[in-house]
Amino acid sequence: ILNVEQSPQSLHVQEGDSTNFTCSFPSSNFYALHWYRWETAKSPEALFVMTLNGDEKKKGRISATLNTKEGYSYLYIKGSQPEDSATYLCASAGGTSYGKLTFGQGTILTVHP
Amino acid sequence: ETGVTQTPRHLVMGMTNKKSLKCEQHLGHNAMYWYKQSAKKPLELMFVYSLEERVENNSVPSRFSPECPNSSHLFLHLHTLQPEDSALYLCASSQAGGDIQYFGAGTRLSVL
């Protein structure tokens, strides 16, 4: 994998559903994997930064896992709420000390009441 | 409020104009970034400044000229832009070393 790829591109779920999306990234020269949440007309907001293979991080109903050997990360949202509707971006920092991030195209999540 | 402020929020300019985008961070960070997001494309890194020194220029055309006079301020000077340069321009800051980046709300630029 040369680029950062996210799937699916968009997702519609009902309130209360749990959901997950995938980020694939180059596993060579890996430094860190970032997840951001971007609501319309607002700034992207950091959710997690993960560096170690097998890392799992949690923030409220949102959690993420990291597999650096195979180059993927999953983001999970438990019991989705309408306020979770946003674009979820992942970005890979590859072997640099100054945070050069390569972003995926994002997964657009819409949670219907 | 992320602590990163961008002005203006919206800008319309002609191809012969010269304008500047401004970014200011109040977080004590020592790295600042310019990103571009065009329609249907991922966020694309343009420039990185670390300790006020430019450390990355991601093959950006010379009609975009960054300036970082101190660790709190970052500018993007624009001249003779093309319509395809119309996009959302985001600024971010972080502690040097690949830490979380804090983003501004962006400047929506339209080039006529």
Image (cartoon, coloured by chain):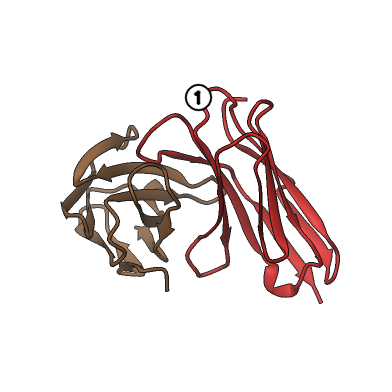
Dot 1 corresponds to which residue? A29
Residue most toward the left? B69
Q: Position of residue B53 (x, y in %)?
A: 19, 41
Residue most toward the top? A28
Q: Position of residue B25 (x, y in %)?
A: 29, 64
Q: Is residue B79 left or right of residue A77?
A: left
Q: Position of residue A34 (x, y in %)?
A: 54, 47
Q: Which chain is in brown here? A: B
Task: Please report the residue visible at 78 percent of the width from the left and 67 percent of the height from the top.
Answer: A80
Amino acid, disc 1: Asn
Q: Is residue A103 above or below residue B14?
A: above
* Chain of the residue on which disc 1 is drawn: A
Q: Residue B26, located in which quarter of the rendered image?
A: bottom left
Q: Is residue B62 visible?
A: no
| Front-lying residue, B27 or B108 | B27
Q: Is residue B17 left or right of residue B3?
A: left
